[in-house]
Image (tube, grey):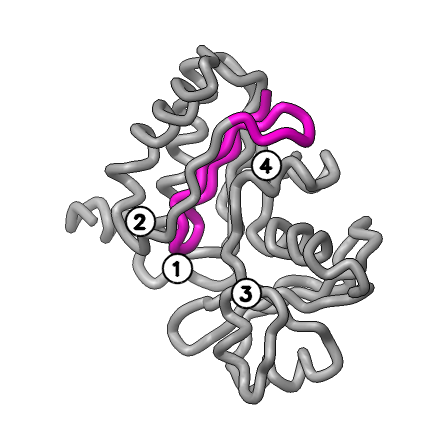
Amino acid sequence: MLLCIDTALAGLSVALCDGDRIVAEHHVLIGRGHAESVIPVVADVMARAGIAAPDSIAVDIGPGSFTGLRIGIAAARALGLAWTVPVHGMRATDLVAIAAFRSLPDCSKLAVVLDAGRGQLYVENFERSFSDPTGEITAMSPEAATRACADAVVVGPGALLLFDANPLYTCWPRAADARLLPVVKRSHSATPLYIRAPDVSASAMFATGS
């Protein structure tokens, strides 16, 4: 059993998967409040599945909000320690891409676009083979992202922020889609993937109690 956790962006997404099967799931866009909710949601998902502990945990390592990434990864590490199970990372762009390819069977290439905040977007290009992305994740302005995605099928929640965009698939990262990923794509180190410097320092957040 694989426990999947995603708090990287607006969603509070938790799923317990057995191979390709979703055993139990919670997927809601909450915007804020991940810190107070993630452990109770995990407990509810596990209780509904009737499982005491998973075999491993996969957590979204980004890109995403600085606070959201810290919350999800800290929760996953704590649970992994309590259950003595391995904890690995998966990327938000991979989750969106693998679900989009499944929803768009005729699409061979696409660009995943996420809202990076501060007037920027995260962009990554993918091919259906999904062996490797065709490019790195890049933070850029909407104008630059619009040019970069001009010849691509654009997907992801940030796609609506592109100029003259008509995205075919705008869903947020969903924890349960980890079951669709190749194992190598959910075997990253469980450490935050920061594409740019965080808005505030960790010391400042602890000092203010954020």
Give SS at disc 1.
Answer: loop
Residue 46 counted in the magenta span: no
Mark 4 / mark 1, whichever is N-terminal: 4
Q: In this rendering, would 117 be left or right of 103? A: left
Mark 3 in CB contact with mark 2 (< 8 angstroms): no
Q: Which amino acid does label 2 sit on?
A: Ala
Residue farthest to the left, as pictured: 208
Query: In the image, which residues are magenta?
Result: 1-23
- Front-most of 20 and 111? 20
User: According to the image, label 3 marks what residue?
Assistant: 170
Mark 2 in CB contact with mark 1 (< 8 angstroms): yes
Gap in Å between the C-alphas at discs 4 and 1?
19 Å
- Front-most of 72 and 199? 72
Mark 3 in CB contact with mark 1 (< 8 angstroms): no
Residue at 41% x, 39% y is 72
Mark 3 / mark 1, whichever is N-terminal: 3
**Which numbered mark, 3 or 2, is in the foreground of this view?**
3
Mark 4 / mark 3, whichever is N-terminal: 3
Residue 82's spot in the image, x, y percent?
41, 14
Q: Which amino acid does label 4 sit on?
A: Ser
Gap in Å between the C-alphas at discs 3 and 2?
31 Å
User: According to the image, label 2 marks what residue?
Assistant: 202
Mark 3 / mark 2, whichever is N-terminal: 3
Residue 61's spot in the image, x, y percent?
52, 45
- Front-most of 189 and 64? 64
User: According to the image, label 1 marks what residue?
Assistant: 198
